[in-house]
Amino acid sequence: MAHRRKFLPLSKHTMDMLVRFILYGLLGWIAEILFTGSYSMLSGSVKLSGQTYLWMFPIYGLAVFLEPMRKQMWTMPWPVRGTIWAGTFFIIEYLSGWLLRAAIGVCPWDYSQAGSLALDGLIRLDYFPVWFTAGLIYERLCDFLVRAQLIYYGEADREAAGDS
């Protein structure tokens, strides 16, 4: 008689979280490719070549753990929320770059050419408007996921996301 391995079933919450992790990872990759491709156009290249790193998928995917921040910031004015998101993303970018540098000896992105606007070559302070905007876009994505019932904290969440 063949022995069948039993797997622990994942809860709906865990599965939804995994789906959102994958979604955030993929959307992060796409956004980075579009951003770097646009930057190449502004630099004069007609190739419009964009790039990202495989390391970025799990880093972007970890946005799933930022969802509770969205809930906590619903009542704040958008300039405050954007500033908080930019600061949060700077911290994540710095820490993930630092951890990668410590673990594999190199950080895939290197901003050291940005001079005084770069901090240890891991973040660029002049990207503040990019991260500010990305945070507000992330909120819209979270609101969509609440409406799609992939994020569900309670009835108040759907109302705040626009479903009354």
Image: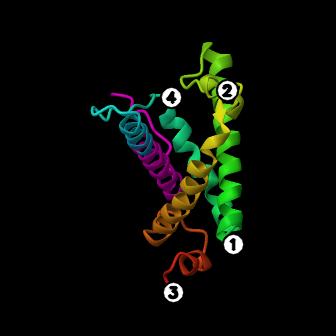
Return the disc, 2 or 4, that comes first in the chain's sequence.
Answer: 4
How many residues crowd mark 3 within 10 Å: few (<14), some (14–19), many (20+)?
few
Q: Secondary structure at mark 1?
A: loop
Query: Marks 1 and 4, Cα distance to the nearest angstrom?
Result: 33 Å
The residue carrying mark 3 is 164
Count of marks, rendered view? 4
Return the disc, 3 or 1, that comes first in the chain's sequence.
Answer: 1
| Image x and y of residue 71, in percent | 65, 67
Query: Marks 3 and 4, Cα distance to the nearest angstrom?
Result: 39 Å
Q: Secondary structure at mark 2?
A: helix
Q: Residue at x 48, y 48 (%)?
A: 24
Return the disc, 1 or 2, that comes first in the chain's sequence.
Answer: 1
How many residues crowd mark 4 within 10 Å: few (<14), some (14–19), many (20+)?
some
Q: Which mark is residue 115?
A: 2
How many residues crowd mark 1 within 10 Å: few (<14), some (14–19), many (20+)?
few
Q: Secondary structure at mark 4?
A: loop
- Type of amino acid under label 2: Gly
Disc nearest the viewer among 3 and 4: 4
Q: Residue at x 56, y 49 (%)?
A: 130
Disc nearest the viewer among 3 and 1: 1
The residue carrying mark 4 is 55
Please, is residue 152 above or below residue 119 in the view? below
- Type of amino acid under label 1: Pro
**What's the colour scheme?**
rainbow
